Image: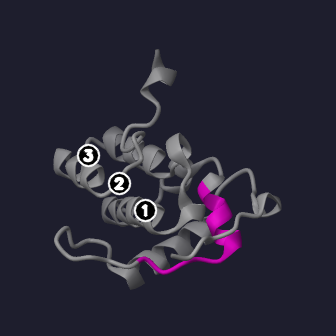
Amino acid sequence: MVVDSFDPSAMSDAVSAEQVRQWLLLAERCVVDDAEGAVTVESAAKELVASLFGRGWDNAAADLSDAEIVLLIRLFTVGEMQHASWQVGAKSPVVPLVKVLKQRDVFDQSLARWIKANTTNRFLPHGDLSALL
């Protein structure tokens, strides 16, 4: 097992369009869409991984297609299980990306089941529900 390191100085406040594009390229290479097959997610540069902690994933996803958002959700769900530095708990980009799909009225419960089946992050797919109280 490889332990990734995290550099807080590489963090930025908001996710950029370029970072989203890089994540999409990584997701397409990993083909994280097969619910049956085991997928190994490639590691990403520390600077890119820092964007997982960034704000504005919902804004960054505004111009993405539904399929691209689902691809990112699958990448981040599986990647978090394979790379220690991708673990962001309730701050996971999966949460705002799911929110975008819900706002578009295209969030499918089968995707929610897939997320739950492929993660140990108790906050996925809906985030910290206690924060809503």
Dot 2 crowding, Cα within 10 Å, few <14, some 14–19, many 20+: some
Pointer 3 and pointer 1: residues touching (CB < 8 Å)?
A: no
Which label is found at residue 119? 2
Query: Is residue 2 rendered to the left or right of residue 15?
Result: left
Can residue 17 be seen at all in this image of the molecule?
Answer: yes
User: Which residue is under mark 3?
Assistant: 107
Q: Amino acid at mark 2?
A: Thr
Q: How is colour applied across the structure in the image?
A: one colour
The alpha-carbon separation of the residues under discs 2 and 3 comes to 18 Å
Dot 1 crowding, Cα within 10 Å, few <14, some 14–19, many 20+: some
Q: Amino acid at mark 1?
A: Met
User: Which residue is under mark 1?
Assistant: 81
Q: Nearer the viewer, residue 100 or 74?
A: 74
Residue furthest bottom in the image: 29
Pointer 1 and pointer 2: residues touching (CB < 8 Å)?
A: yes
Q: Looking at the image, is mark 3 or mark 1 nearer the viewer? A: 1
Mark positioned earlier in the residue sequence (1 or 2):
1
Residue furthest front in the image: 1
Q: Nearer the viewer, residue 126 or 87?
A: 87
- The residue depicted at 38 percent of the width and 44 percent of the height is 124
- The residue depicted at 38 percent of the width and 81 percent of the height is 30
Q: Looking at the image, is mark 2 or mark 3 nearer the viewer? A: 2
Can residue 16 be seen at all in this image of the molecule?
Answer: no
The stretch of residues the image draws in magenta is 41-52
Counting from the top left corner in percent of width and height, residue 104 is at 32, 44
Residue furthest top in the image: 133
* Quadrant of the image occupied by residue 29: bottom left
The alpha-carbon separation of the residues under discs 3 and 1 comes to 22 Å
Counting from the top left corner in percent of width and height, residue 19 is at 61, 69
